[in-house]
Image (tube, rainbow, N blue to C red):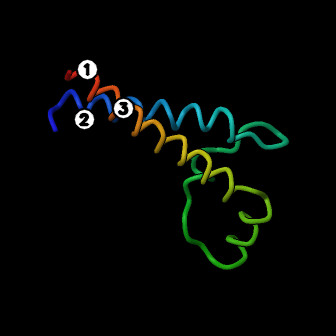
Amino acid sequence: MNSKTILSITVFAVVGLVVGYWFFGKNAGGHVSVSTLFTFGGNAIERTFRSISGIEEMRNKILLCGAAGVMAGLLVSFKLKK
């Protein structure tokens, strides 16, 4: 992979994460903080709270948007090569 491909993948991944956060990172009081979304681990009580509050589902959707961005970056970089 050359530097343009890596740059394209990185840009699209970041755009995918931002778009995912914009759509799926909302809670009743506004957007959930990024540090809350990407905090892993913790004890059983913290994991239960994140599961009940929907933070786990939000995180998964946002990460899937980032993965879709990676795939879009790959497709764009391969199309530009041809």
Q: Amino acid at mark 2?
A: Ile
> Whole-percent x and y of residue 80?
25, 20
- What's the mark number on residue 80? 1
Q: Quadrant of residue 38?
A: bottom right
Density class for disc 2 (Cα within 10 Å; few <14, some 14-19, many ≥20) is some
How many numbered marks are there?
A: 3
Question: What is the C-alpha distance between the residues marked 1 and 2?
Answer: 13 Å
Is residue 76 rendered to the left or right of residue 45?
Answer: left
Is residue 75 rendered to the left or right of residue 54?
Answer: left
Q: Is residue 13 above or below residue 82?
A: below
Q: Quadrant of residue 45?
A: bottom right
Q: Amino acid at mark 1?
A: Leu
Is residue 37 rendered to the left or right of residue 67?
Answer: right
| Residue for badge 2 | 6
Q: Residue at x 40, y 39 (%)?
A: 71
- Looking at the image, which residue sits at the far left? 2
